[in-house]
Image (cartoon, helix red, strand yellow):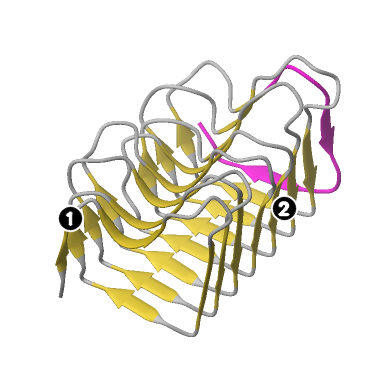
Amino acid sequence: TSTGGTYFIYGSGSSSSIAIKGSNFTGNRYNGRLIHSSGSSSNIQISDCIFDGNYAGSTDYFIHSEGGLSVKDSDIKNQNSTAYSSYLLYNSGGSSVTVSGTTFDNNRTTIGMIFNSSTLTSVIDSKFTGNTMSGAAIFSDGTTNPMSIENCTFENNTNTSGTAFLYSPGSNSANYISINNSTFKNNTSSTSAFLHTAGALSIQPSQFEQNT
């Protein structure tokens, strides 16, 4: 167990690159972000990792990239943040967010699971189960930031307030939500809409069951 300051792992260069593979982060407590890369050309790549029972106290995001962000074949579970405006994955740069083969289970944040302010948000072959948040599970912000969900399962998640469960508010026609071969079951969203897009919405064969 570790107790950190503002960052646990920090890449400070404008083109910083952080690649983490086959590692476990368990029971760490820190006052800021677990992993952060700064600079619009920076990126974070995570694969075959486990994040279990980490706690963020006073600041916002568990993993924050100012460039691009990729998470593959990993488990993110039992994360807890009581900080204002917290997400598990947050990308504020000019590149895409790609999540594949990853499980999000029993996490608690004050806002949501994934936020992307730049280009495409792609989530493939992943599961979101038993998470509690006060905003969108996935929030694709900006005017040209489409969201693609494929072969995913969302089950027993709770959105207690704020935005829709999947939220893509940009008004540009390129800003859409695409859902393909995915399951949404027993999820609760305390907003007026479960799916919200200001652009196009495409749903290919998928299952929506007992969501409220």
Confirm whether the magenta stretch covers residue 201: yes
* Quarter of the view holding residue 195: top right
Q: Secondary structure at mark 2?
A: loop
Highlighted range, magenta: 197-212
Estimate the spatial distance between the alpha carbons at disc 1 and disc 2, rounded to whole Å: 39 Å
Instruction: Work out whether mark 1 precedes mark 2 in sequence or the reverse, and give the earlier one.
Output: 1
Judging depth in this view, the residue of 190 and 38 nearest the camera is: 38
Q: Residue at x 31, y 36 (%)?
A: 110
Number of on-image labels: 2
* Quarter of the view holding residue 116: top right
Per the rendering, the mark at residue 105 is: none
Judging depth in this view, the residue of 93 and 176 nearest the camera is: 93
Q: Which residue is mark 2?
A: 182
In the image, residue 159 above or below residue 75: above
Which amino acid is tagged 1? Gly
Which one is closest to the eye, mark 1 or mark 2?
1
In the image, residue 186 above or below residue 168: below
Q: Which residue is mark 1?
A: 5
In the image, residue 127 above or below residue 85: below
